[in-house]
Image (cartoon, rainbow, N blue to C red):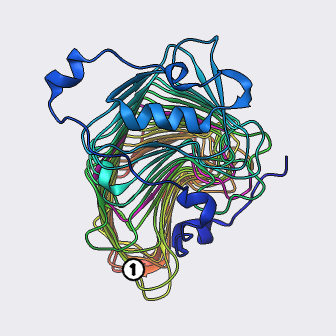
């Protein structure tokens, strides 16, 4: 089946696709049911078979299943012996919470339709298998805004054309937990953003926890459509998210737009075309203890105004470009207060960490501290810090870049201290410097150690007002500090 390939700009910046006839589903909500939890617990769960459903995967069971859902607060679809073919949307739509459960029974798409829609209350769907059956369009479970507090628990989704779960604006406190989703979002007639495996749009306090999302075109997308208030207080934790092979060029593992006060933690993300974790215009976002492999960057944040981001304790293996990229290379965005700490970056393609802006943008107040950059001769640079001000590069360990371990270019008021720089210039020994400061001003380089294949430990080209103290070096090609700037203070720089 042809994969839908949309651009990153379309997905992240474009206007959401309007809900058309397929997305909207059909049918009217059932009459209100008793509202007490005790009444639900006291009522035995009904079976669709009690309402004439055949469950053989051949007969159209849409009407029978909907009749059962309309009449009962609790519905049990049964075990793997039951496959309900549907050609219309199943409506979980009573005004009080319903519990829809199964022990492996399947809802199978017999047409290009949305399989189930939740509305009217916080419902629970547990243990069902949703089979998209190779249709060109249609989602599996849609949670409407009126179904805030719903839960999708331990379900299975296979070959869904669009999203396995789509959480609509206003469906706050919805949870997607412990489910397995395989080959979702691949439908040839599915447009962005519904080609994600899980899509959360302007719904706060949602949680996507401990799921397996396998062979995705796109993984999870948390989308706020306005900068203020954004999408807030969500948690994405403990998921395994893998890309399709080959993935769409612009695909991402976890996408975030206008995120506020949210957490992405402990996920494993493998094999996407673009960034494993992408943050566009996010504030107060924590990205911690994730493990990524491949992708363009392990984490990207920036483009739009961005602030108070913490990127910590992650492991990024073999990104095609870099482990962490903080960038405001377009527009006039202010990026401020990003902390990158305690991450391990292994064998990147171009750099370990990049912090940069251009034009009339401003990037300031960045802290890059205590990271291990195991470049291993695969990338030219350990770190590229460009057009940045009032920031700190502290206590990092950078091993075996082809060129510079740290390249500062066009920066102002930067502290670079306590870094260990091994075998810079390993691609061309005695040709590149461990710490290169170019066309910059007021850089304080203090207590850095360089050894191995670099030419100089510190090289200053242009600029004014540098302070270089406490540099230690061993076995370099030429020596310790070369000063090509003006008004520099050099002190206590000695070989080991």
Question: Does residue 492 appear left or right of residue 103 in this picture?
Answer: left
Single out the residue that lies furthest toward the right: 1
Question: Does residue 75 appear left or right of residue 269 in this picture?
Answer: left
In magenta, the rendered stretch is 248-276
Residue 281: image location, x then y, percent = 39, 68
For the question of whether residue 369 can be seen, the reply is no
Single out the residue that lies furthest toward the bottom: 360
347 or 188: nearer the viewer: 188
Residue 404: image location, x then y, percent = 59, 55
Residue 354: image location, x then y, percent = 51, 59
Q: Residue at x 39, y 79 (%)?
A: 333
Identify the residue position indicated by label 1 in the image: 333
80 shown above or below 305: above
Specify few, some or many for label 1: CA neighbours under 10 Å numbering under 14, 14-19, or 20 or more.
Answer: many
Q: Check the picture and name the quadrant holding the C terminus.
A: top left
343 or 115: nearer the viewer: 115
496 shown above or below 238: below
33 shown above or below 104: below
Residue 180: image location, x then y, percent = 56, 26
Secondary structure beneath dot 1 equals loop
Q: Residue at x 32, y 39 (%)?
A: 150
Query: Which image quadrant is residue 53 in?
Result: top right
Question: Does residue 451 appear left or right of residue 21 in this picture?
Answer: left
213 or 9: nearer the viewer: 213
């Amino acid at each position: 089946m042809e994969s839908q390939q949309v651009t990153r700009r379309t997905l992240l910046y474009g206007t959401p696709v309007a809900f058309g006839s397929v997305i909207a589903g059909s049918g009217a909500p059932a009459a209100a049911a008793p509202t007490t939890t005790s009444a639900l617990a006291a009522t035995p769960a009904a079976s669709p078979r009690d309402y004439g459903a055949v469950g053989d995967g051949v007969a159209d069971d849409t009407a029978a299943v909907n009749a059962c859902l309309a009449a009962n607060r609790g519905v049990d679809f049964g075990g793997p012996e039951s496959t309900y073919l549907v050609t219309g949307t199943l409506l979980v739509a009573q005004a009080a919470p319903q519990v829809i459960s199964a022990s492996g029974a399947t809802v199978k798409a017999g047409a290009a339709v949305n399989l189930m829609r939740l509305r009217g209350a916080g419902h629970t769907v547990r243990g069902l298998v949703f089979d998209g059956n190779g249709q060109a369009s249609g989602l599996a479970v849609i949670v409407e805004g009126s179904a805030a507090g719903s839960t999708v628990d331990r379900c299975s989704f296979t070959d869904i054309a669009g999203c396995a779960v789509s959480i609509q604006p206003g469906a706050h406190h919805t949870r997607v937990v412990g489910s397995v989703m395989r080959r979702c979002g691949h439908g040839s007639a599915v447009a962005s953003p519904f080609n994600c495996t899980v899509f959360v749009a302007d719904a706060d306090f949602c949680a996507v926890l401990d799921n397996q999302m396998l062979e995705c075109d796109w993984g999870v997308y948390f989308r706020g459509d306005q900068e203020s208030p954004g999408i807030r207080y969500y948690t994405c934790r403990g998921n395994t998210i893998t890309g399709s092979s080959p993935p769409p060029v612009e695909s991402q593992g976890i996408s975030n737009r206008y995120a506020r006060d949210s957490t992405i933690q402990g996920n494993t993300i493998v094999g996407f075309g673009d960034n494993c974790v992408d943050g566009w215009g996010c504030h107060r976002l924590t990205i911690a203890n994730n493990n990524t492999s491949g992708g363009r960057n392990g984490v990207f944040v920036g483009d739009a105004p961005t602030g108070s981001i913490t990127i910590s304790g992650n492991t990024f293996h073999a990104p095609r470009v870099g482990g962490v990229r903080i960038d405001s290379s377009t527009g006039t965005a202010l990026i401020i207060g990003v902390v990158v700490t305690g991450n391990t970056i292994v064998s990147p393609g171009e750099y370990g960490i990049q912090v940069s802006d251009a034009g009339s943008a401003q990037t300031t107040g960045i802290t890059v501290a205590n990271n291990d950059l195991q470049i291993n001769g695969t990338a030219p640079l350990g770190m590229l810090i460009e057009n940045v001000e009032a920031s700190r590069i502290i206590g990092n360990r950078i091993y075996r870049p082809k060129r510079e371990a740290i390249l500062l270019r066009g920066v102002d008021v930067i502290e670079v201290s306590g870094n260990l720089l091994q075998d810079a210039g390993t691609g061309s020994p005695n040709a590149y410097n461990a710490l290169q400061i170019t066309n910059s001003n007021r850089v304080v380089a203090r207590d850095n150690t360089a050894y191995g294949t670099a030419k100089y430990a510190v090289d200053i080209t242009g600029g004014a007002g540098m302070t270089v103290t406490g540099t230690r070096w061993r076995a370099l090609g030429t020596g310790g500090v070369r000063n090509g700037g003006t008004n520099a203070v050099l002190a206590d720089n000695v070989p080991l």
